[in-house]
Amino acid sequence: MAVISFNPKQVNKRLLAVLSDRARDIVVSRFGLGTDTERKTLEAIGAKYKITRERVRQIENYALATIKKSDVYQKEEGTMKELREIVVSLGGIVCEEDLLNHISSNEGVQNHINFLLVLGDFFKREKEDTQFKHRWIVDDEVANRVHESLKKLYENLSDKDLIPEGEMVSSFLDYLKDISDRYKNEEVIKRWLSISKTIKRNPLGEWGVSSSPNVSARGIRDYAFLVMRRHGSPMHFTEVASGILDIFGKKAHTATCHNELIKDERFVLVGRGLYALKEWGYEKGVVRDVIKNILKEDGPLTKEEIVAKVLNERHVKENTILVNLQNPSYFKRDTKGRYVATF
């Protein structure tokens, strides 16, 4: 958290003193600068004074202009420069929420900082849109580079991609090769990544497309996927349910978990209640189908070769594989004693 040399509430008290009582009350209400930190709408303030929302807006704009023309404002130049240096230290462009939280966790203090940012000539606020969150900018050139690089980064991601944070930082830096060295550190890069609404970090710290269920987990299936991906090898559905509770604090009934895994294409049943991820190379189907796929890919194989390959795909008894091979409706031997599929 940043250490600031000024008291935001005291600075704003001096700035607001140049206004009339009504204008001051409107500004305080609009920005949540009083004991009530809720930022009031134009309509709510208009109802209080029995004026239109447009009139409230006019008074607000006039009040801000009055403050900026005052001698008191000129005397706070040091305060504005200090705020500017904080934004620069965070990357020259920073998500509004990150900036305010970096300075204080207190909502009232955050409102006062926000008011100073609105007043300051150094600062430009870009509103939230479909691609980016609300953000504050003090370096337009850097901001443009960050915006374009985030767009390119998103365009090169698929819905299934899950990228470790270190790799994502490196990939993003590849798009920002000419950026100033003062910004080339991991914390700044991660803050820039957090500006994006199309790219997001999942609960396990991996990055991907925000709309992907692997990133924005919404139910048991998504949490199960993340648990199994973290585990790295097949898990029994009871273990998956326990993992969801241990890692995410989400209660998952074992029976419900089993049913959800069965219905999702990302999971493959590889043994009695044992599941693996399809992305690990496992294919859906019973043992017979697994044998068929192996023979289709590798050609005729001996019994021993088939058993070894199937056991890499399924956690079953060897005899189960042999019983399937003995069914002439599905498999037969060639002249060299190797098995081929007949269906």
Image (tube, helix red, strand yellow):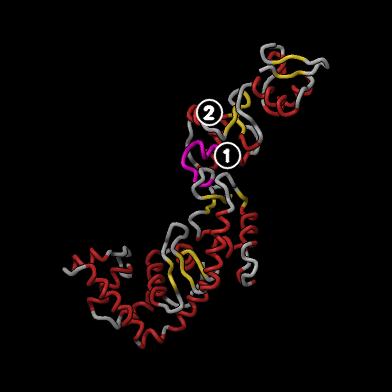
Residue 227 numbered mark, or none: 1
- 75 and 9: which one is in front? 75
Q: Is residue 138 above or below residue 225?
A: below
Q: Is residue 280 left or right of residue 152?
A: right
Type of amino acid at the residue the image marks with label 2: Ile
x and y percentages locating residue 247 in the rendered image:
55, 42
Q: How many marks?
A: 2
Q: Is residue 292 above or below residue 60?
A: above
Nearest to the eye among marks 2 and 1: give it: 2
Can you say which quadrant of the picture contains the C terminus? top right
Write down the quadrant of residue 268 in the picture.
Answer: top right
> Which SS class for mark 1?
helix
x and y percentages locating residue 18 in the rendered image:
30, 83
x and y percentages locating residue 146 in the rendered image:
55, 65
Q: Is 225 in the magenta?
A: yes
Residue ID at (52%, 32%)? 264
Q: Is 105 in the magenta?
A: no
- Mark 1 and mark 2 in contact (Cβ < 8 Å)? no
Q: Are there few (<14), some (14-19), or many (20+) residues within 10 Å of tag 2?
A: some
> Which SS class for mark 2?
helix
Task: Identify the residue under disc 2.
Answer: 262
Magenta span: 215-226
- 56 and 288: which one is in front? 288
Residue 74 numbered mark, or none: none
Mark 2 and mark 1: span between their CA atoms?
16 Å
Q: Is residue 323 above or below residue 17?
A: above
Question: Of callouts 2 and 1, which one flags the residue occurring earlier in the amino acid sequence?
Answer: 1
Type of amino acid at the residue the image marks with label 1: Val
Q: Is residue 172 left or right of residue 87?
A: right
